[in-house]
Image: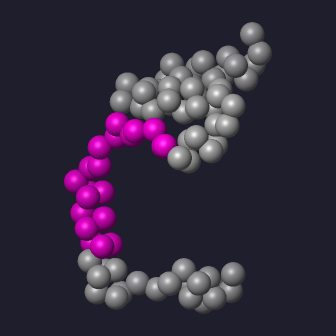
Amino acid sequence: MNPIRSELHRLVDALPDHKVRTVKQIIEIIIRENPWEELLASPPEVDEHLTEEEKLAINEAEQDIAAGLTKPWEQVKKELGL
């Protein structure tokens, strides 16, 4: 068997159960004729659930945005010299 194919099998076998469906959907899309267009048009469902810490971080970020405490990306790049 091709070494890359063997590595792919190893990676799939190592997937946690809650990610198997998502990876299966992505592989099926890649096999079809216009994979990237299809993937972008209908991204696979993600079975992962947010942790409480992630939910709190999202809530905090949304509050910062609402309060005007964020900077536009262009401004950040300019400040960093990018």
In the image, residue 10 sits, relative to residue 29, either above or below, namely above
Q: Quadrant of residue 10?
A: top right
**What colouring style does the render use?**
one colour
Comparing 73 with 81, the one in front is: 73
Left or right placement of residue 62 versus residue 37 in this view: left
Residue plotted at (60% across, 89% down):
79
> Which residue is situated farthest in the right direction here?
2
Apparent side of residue 3 relative to residue 39 in the rendered image (left or right):
right
Would residue 65 be counted in the magenta stretch? no
Residue 59 in picture, x, y percent from top left: 25, 68
* Count of marks placed on residues: 0
Picture residue at 63% right of the left edge, 88% below the top: 78
* The one of 35 and 55 positioned closer to us in this rendering: 35
User: Is residue 61 placed above or below 21 in the rendered structure?
Assistant: below
Query: Does the image show residue 3?
Result: yes
Dividing the picture into quadrants, the one containing residue 27 is: top right
- Segment tinted magenta in the rendering: 42-62
In this picture, is 69 found above or below 51? below
Q: Is residue 43 magenta?
A: yes
Look at 67% across and 17% down and name the residue there.
6
Query: Is 81 left, or right, of 23 in this rendering?
Result: right
The image shows residue 31, relative to residue 57, as above or below, that is above
Q: In the picture, residue 30 is in which quadrant?
A: top right
Residue 43 drawn at (x, y percent): 48, 43
Return the x and y of residue 77 as percentages of the image width and height.
62, 82
**Quarter that holds the N terminus:** top right
What percent of the width, then of the height, locates residue 14? 49, 23
Quadrant, the C terminus: bottom right
Q: Residue at x 56, y 88 (%)?
A: 75
> Hey, which residue is sitting farthest top in the picture?
1
Residue 16 in sight here: no
